[in-house]
Amino acid sequence: MTLHSWLTTMRYTIRHVTNFAYEASISESVMEARMQPRSDREQHCIRFGLSTTPSARVRMYQDPEGNMVHHFGIPGPHSRLTVTAEAFVECTPPPLLPATLGIDAWDQIDAATATGEFWDAINPSPFARRTALLCALAEDMKLQRDSDHRDPIATLFQVMADLFTRFEYRPKSTRVDSPIDDALSTRQGVCQDFSHIMIALVRQLGIPCRYVSGYLFQPGETPERSMDGATHAWVEAWLLHLGWVGFDPTHNSLAGEHHIRVAVGRDYADVPPTRGVFKGLSSVRSELAVGVSVGTAQHATDPTAFTPWMSREAASPLVDADSQQQQQQ
């Protein structure tokens, strides 16, 4: 760790509570959660705990992308389910990006993707795929490689800036399962939509790109964008020897020490915070309420370190079924 990163290390406490309420008692539920912040180059999850009410034995494993997955089952009847995740995380600023990657950068990226190592990050995925509206946007943006004048880094900044100026951030304008065409047709969306559109565009250029779920700490007054509260989403593009570099199209900025990474995948379908099924009567409906708090802290052992930064409660009804799926944005 450099002196600069040590001086600017940010420490956060996070509390993420999800409440499921059912109109009638259900007989069983099974769920997995991707809520534990990652530990990697610029981020270290010092402490994490996940608990449930009713209580359940929580097990964990690491998926192929390095995300920590907690899973549990509640076999008895219950009418409510609460999942609480608490974490203490340290984040440092990422290295500064160079101005360019060099004159042969595009050729080197092509050589890397030709090996097949980045197949998942270069091909279409459920929420980040080519559509007629996406192609029209790409044409309007004049999206193309320009090996003579525009480096891959400059291209990524331009794509991010174009999305920021062309699309309006509007909470609740789309749903958790909305295809990108919903946001493309109205030019409105939330961070999830901004990320999916950027991923699809960047993959068209042949640059590996993936989805990041997590949290964003914004000191001071709450800004105009990212007021959805519960979680945040941005993208990471693979840039030669730099590795995965974070870009936040919702805010037209690089991901930095205020971005707390939880999980990475092809798109949202791979990394919802919670996902599961339950058994019950066909008339049963469930309502999802989420509350998230993120605050700065000084020491991991400080019991009073938690300072609430943001919180939200939002309801999202799920479809009726005898065996129903439940997942969270």
Image: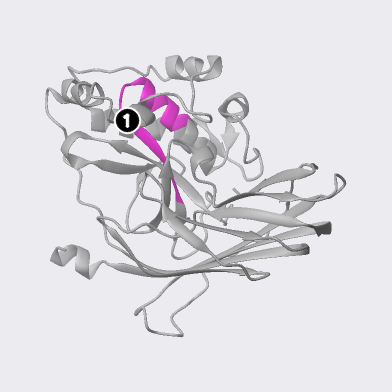
Does residue 204 show up magenta in the picture?
A: yes
Residue 174, quarter of picture: top right
Which residue does the image show at 63% across and 45% down from the upper left? 171
Most foreground residue, 45 or 227: 45
Residue 18 percent location from the top left of the image:
63, 61
Residue 325's place in the image compared with 307, above or below, is above
Residue 188, quarter of picture: top right
Number of disc labels: 1
Most foreground residue, 317 or 91: 317
Q: Secondary structure at mark 1?
A: loop
Does residue 294 show up magenta in the picture?
A: no
Q: Amino acid at mark 1?
A: Pro
Most foreground residue, 76 or 290: 76
Task: Tell me how the rendering is colored.
Answer: one colour
- For the N terminus, the image quarter is bottom left
Residue 266 percent location from the top left of the image:
43, 35
Relative horizontal placement of residue 271, taking residue 43 as reference (left or right): right
**Local crowd at mark 1 within 10 Å, few (<14), some, or many (≥20)?**
many
Relative horizontal placement of residue 322, taking residue 211 as reference (left or right): right
Residue 38 percent location from the top left of the image:
37, 57
Relative horizontal placement of residue 106, taking residue 293 as reference (left or right): left
Residue 53 percent location from the top left of the image:
66, 70
Residue that protrudes farthest toward the right in the picture: 283
Q: Can residue 58 be seen in this snapshot?
A: yes
Residue 33, quarter of picture: bottom right
Q: Which residue is mark 1?
A: 208
Q: Can residue 310 be seen in this snapshot?
A: no
Which residue does the image show at 28% across and 18% down from the upper left? 145
Residues rendered magenta in the picture = 197-213
